[in-house]
Amino acid sequence: MSLLVRVPLGTAAFIAWLGVAFGSYNPPPPDDDLGPSPDPVAEFPLTGTFLYDGEVLAMPSQVAVVGDRIVLVDGFAERPIHVLDAARGTDVATFGRRGEGPGEFEWPRAVEPVGSGSNGFWVFDAALSRLTLVEPDLWAAQPSSERVTLSIRGPAQVTNVIRIGGDLLLGAGFFSDGRLGHFNGTGDYTGASGPLPVSATEAPPEVLQHAYRGVLTSGPARTRLVFANRHAGFLEIYGSDGEPLRRIDGPFEFEPSFTVKLGERGPGLATGDDLRFGYVDVATTNDRIYALFSGRTRAGHPEDAVYGQAVHVFDWDGTLVSILHLDADAMAIAVDEARSRLLAVRHLPAPAVLSYDLPVRL
């Protein structure tokens, strides 16, 4: 059986994009697990504690630490942006609603801190291809017409963007002329950088980009970026100019399993039950990359292939430093350096944010 996947828009497509199925929770079968790491590396089993499991959560997809706050992106909740107190895990505020106007969201997918000690952050909406600036302490007093937004205009679907500076944004998406898209300070596309993925399956550029899609994030100083491949066993490191620096092969090497099918709107990506999930999320510090790894196929894990329990910890030179084993299936992670902990978003059996103390020897 194969599934023809096109550029996702809207709620139903968001579920398909994540590979999530609703239903009762059952422990995943082990029949397609990749087994222990073949590399000799320090491994740490971690036990989580509940930080937040508020009833307002629906299906959070992203978590970030912003100053002394924790930000959750939850496109299925009545209000999609949740802000928590980082120390206590209590509600501070919720923002946004469904729509296309200022302060509204259709498909919020990524959050990026403003930096410089601010509690502000940018939220990228993939359906609207738009960044929205959220400053929690000012939001309620701001008229909607004064809320800062930036439309990202390009030749292809953009899945998320990173602000490098006032005149440069780098984006992941289905570009045909390079791996990362470049946008100027007004959101206009100026070209792309980096070679397209190389696959044994012959495919048009936009289909290749779809097969090798993933999460793009930056280090805290925004001098380097990491791209975590969602359906492959490797990461890609880029400089702040968008040029590739190195590929990091994880302990389990595999490429996306897909074919190309023609539809009414041209070629599209077709995947089946043998599709394996790789790095489903990634977080960084100045000296470490934390990559949430699944390794599961749809066939072996029909309801939870999209989740990961292993966090592969690399340095920025590509050395695998350690592997953290979580006691829950995680959708997204963030690192809270100030409190030496890893945060993980869990969906099943109920949505929650879990906290894991990081080992000293990382």
Image (cartoon, rainbow, N blue to C red):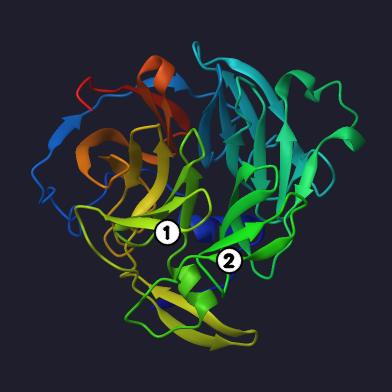
Q: Which residue is mark 1?
A: 244
How many numbered badges does the structure rendering display?
2
Q: Residue 238, percent across and down? A: 44, 53
- Residue drawn at (22%, 61%), measured in percent from left and top? 253
For disc 2, the marked residue is 192
Residue 156 image label: none
Picture layout, residue 247 above or below residue 97 = below
* Front one among 187 and 232: 187
Regarding residue 304, the answer to whether it shows in the image is no
Amino acid of disc 2? Ala
User: Foreground residue, 103 or 11?
Assistant: 103
Q: Residue furthest top?
A: 88
Point 47% across, 58% down: residue? 243
Q: Quadrant of residue 329?
A: top left
Q: Amino acid at mark 1?
A: Pro
Query: What percent of the width, then of the height, locates residue 158?
Result: 62, 60
Task: Kindly report the distance in space between the C-alpha atoms of the residues bearing marks 2 and 1.
Answer: 12 Å
Q: Position of residue 52 (x, y in %)?
A: 49, 22
> For mark 1, does the 10 Å Cα neighbourhood hold few (<14), some (14 to 19), or many (20 or more) residues?
some
**Quadrant hosting residue 69:** top right
Relative placement, left or right, of 139 versus 247 is right
